[in-house]
Every structure is written in structure tokens, then in C-alpha cells.
Image (spheres, grey):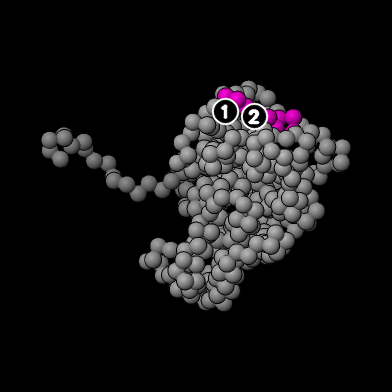
Amino acid sequence: AIDIAKLRDLTGYITYDPGYKNTGATKSAITFLDGEEGILRHCGYSIEELADKASFLEVAYLLLHGELPTQAQLDAFEAAVQKYTVANQALLNIAQVIPTSTHPMSELSALVGLMEGQYSTDEKEDNILRLLAALPIFAAWNYKKSIGEGIVAPDQSLDYCSNFLKMMFAKPGEAYEVNSIVSKAMNKLLILHADHEQNCSTSTVRLIGSSHASLFSSISGGIMALFGPLHGGANQAVIEMLEEIKQAGGDTAKFIEMAKDKNSGFRLMGFGHRVYKNFDPRARIIKKAADDVLSALGVQDPILKIAQELEAAALSDEYFVARKLYPNVDFYSGIIYRALGIPTNMFTILFAIGRLPGWIAQHQEMMTNKEPIGRPRQIYVGATPRAFVDINKR
Ligand code: ACO
């Protein structure tokens, strides 16, 4: 058999694949994605069915265990997450002194990283549950701080999404009725983000974890990778772009032309995807959910009309058609978050809460399979050998 490592050392042969566009970094049994056909499945189950029929923690269980839970298993899993749905006082003290000028994603990443000092990294099962419980709590702390309001304690009697909404929107000490339309919409949105195979943040989680850094460190890094506007940060960028178009008088054609001009530095946010060269199946579901949620809540948001116009214009434009640039998951999600009352700078936090089970499952799979440390190579294109030049002779 050919020893590839030896051959590479002898010949200097290295696969050059910037952006890993065609590199399979791992074998995974979690998520199947066919970008040409627009298919997404988790452990064999279609995203359409999961978004329609499951709860977010049910999908989290599926990703972590590879099978849908029985009712008893789901009850036990939900109870285990609820058990850890408590505020950690040391982390709350830190969260409260993080300046409000800090982006919520930076704060979230910092708090998750700091969980490392609070819990033993040996408690692997418990730490998974702690993370699932903690992210909505950290997000709600951030929101309450940003509006100058006291925090609302987690309510262990509520389901995952309802508890999050209560911690976000209840006034401290006052009764709060969770709107079931809002909590169902939140459930669907979280499911749609739950995993997406080896995307930028998931690959980051696996790469950090491959050095045997803890789960907390790996997730903290994944949150930072998600923050970028070319990845999860796009949901915030989409709303900002739609607002900008509205402010500029709603002339979508002008922005389409700008996106086609490579020198403009402007891209149509929420369009295009590294893997989907067809409709992102999540975008279809979200588009319909946006229509449903807005009409159920009686919200009339003018940017929904701008989004629809932009989509129609792009889908009939040769530039976008030729490059197979379709709306992605981020295009309509922000419109729903906005209707639900989530502030724009927290949209990517919602993505992180949704993606968390996927990150954890991928980390777990990598550790179980004892994958080696991730360490890409490079093609060196720098200077050839040369003699050191004394500083006074340069
Ligand atoms: N607007 C205008 N042109 C675009 C866009 C866009 N949104 N996206 C891609 N293109 C063009 C590129 O300029 C390029 O054109 P060329 O072939 O003439 O040079 C071609 O389409 C291919 O684009 P790449 O950047 O090479 O594609 P890549 O796979 O590297 O990038 C990405 C994918 C980052 C998602 C890109 O489409 C983009 O920047 N989209 C906008 C940001 C966004 O919505 N990100 C969210 C992605 S989904 C997610 O992370 C959850």
C-alpha cells in the first residue's frame, strides 16, 4: 500500500483547496446535505418533517443520540436540561460588568468559555445539559442588561422556548403569559438551525476540540466563528440591508445592480451558499413561517415586502441565476425574529442557541471516533532562503 504521508513528505505533494470547498474533513452520521437538490436530513429525517412535527429538544436528542427519543426518553432529557436551568451566580456577576458596548455574541462566547472554570470538564454528560440550559439564560441576561432591566429567573416548569421567552420579555416580579404562536415559531426556528454538517462554526468546534480542548472552549470558539457576517452574522446583516433599502426609498433594483458590481464591495446579504446550489430547504420553511407569524401576530412589516421584491428580482436576474444564488436560511429569519420582538443585534444569538445541539453532537462524534488533531497544510509562496541583513544595512 502507498504510504500517503511518506509520499507527501518526499514529494511535497499537498492538496490545495482554499476554503475547503471540496475537502471532506471527516466522516459523519449526523447530517446529510445535498446542495444540488436542496435536501437536508438529520439522522435520516427530513428537515421539513422535523420542523413541522418535533420539538427543539427532541431534535437535540436526535442529533446527540442518533435516534428519535421515546416519550419516556424525551421526558427524562427535558427534565435533565430543566435541572440545570438555573443561574450561575459567579457568571452572572461577570455578565453584569461586561460593558453594554460589547456585542452579544462576544459576551456569549466569553461566558461559555468561562463555564470551564465553574464545572469539571470530566462531567461530560452534565456539561452537555448545562450548555443547553445556559445559552438561553446568557442571552436573556444580555438583553435585560441592554434595556436596563433586572433579570428574570429561569422557570423550570416551562418548556425550553417558553422559558427563554419569559426570561427575555417578562418584567421582573410580574406575571407573564407566553404567547403560544411566538413560542411555536421560536421552536421551529431553533430546529431549522440545529445542525448543518461541516459549516464554518461547526468545523471550528471540531478543530478546537481536536486538540482536546474542552467542550466549553470548543463551543466558545464556534460562537465566534458564527459571529461573522458571511456566516451566522448574516441574519443581522440582512435586516440592516433591508432597512437601508427602505431608507433609500425602496429601490430594490439599485441594490441588485450594486450587488452585481464586484467593485461596490456590496453583496446581497442572505443570498448564496457554499453548498446549496438550489433553494436552501430551510429558507422555504422560514419564508412560509414568516408569512404565518406576521399575519398571526398582526404585524405589518414593510421590510417583508422589500424582501419579497428583492427575492423575486434576484431570482429572475441572469447574474444570480447563473451563479445559483438563492435566498439562504438567514434571508427571512430576521424578519420573524423582529416580529417576535428580538433586537437586531441578538439575531445571531438565536442562531447560536439553535446550532448548539449540532455543535455538541459533532464534537461528541469527533471524540468518540478518536479523530486526530486537525492540522491543514499550506503551499508556501514566500521568499526563498536569504542571508540575515544587519538592521543598519536594511
Ligand atoms: N451577492 C452577490 N454576489 C454573490 C453573492 C451575494 N450574496 N454571493 C456570492 N456571489 C458571487 C460571488 O461574487 C462569485 O461571483 P464570481 O463567480 O463572478 O466571482 C460567485 O457568486 C460565487 O461566490 P463565492 O463567494 O465564491 O461563494 P462562496 O461559496 O465562497 O461563498 C457565501 C458563499 C459566503 C455564503 C456567499 O454567497 C456570501 O457572501 N453570501 C452573503 C452572506 C450570507 O448570506 N451568508 C450566510 C450564509 S448561510 C449561513 O452561514 C447560515
In the image, is residue 289 above or below residue 162? below
Secondary element type, mark 1: helix
> Closer to the camera, 365 or 341?
341
User: With 361 as the anchor, is 275 left or right in this view?
Assistant: left
Q: Which mark is residue 87?
A: 2
What residue is shown at x 62% (from left), y 52% (from top)?
A: 341
Task: Examine the structure image and report whether residue 270 is included in the region drawn in magenta.
Answer: no
> Closer to the camera, 195 or 277?
195
Q: Position of residue 315 (x, y in %)?
A: 58, 73
Instruction: Find the magenta span and give its range.
Output: 81-92
From the image, which quarter does the C terminus lie in? top left
Q: Are marks 2 and 1 in contact (CB under 8 Å)?
A: yes
User: With 185 as the anchor, is 108 left or right in this view?
Assistant: left
Q: Position of residue 264 (x, y in %)?
A: 39, 66
From the image, which quarter does the N terminus lie in? top right
Q: Alpha-carbon distance for marks 2 and 1?
A: 8 Å
Q: Amino acid at mark 2?
A: Ala
Residue placed under numbered mark 1 in the picture? 91
> Closer to the camera, 291 or 220?
291
Q: Which mark is residue 153?
A: none
Q: Position of residue 48 (x, y in %)?
A: 75, 58
In the image, is residue 281 above or below residue 321? above
The part of the image, by quadrant, that contains residue 161 is: top right
Q: Position of residue 13 (x, y in %)?
A: 46, 48
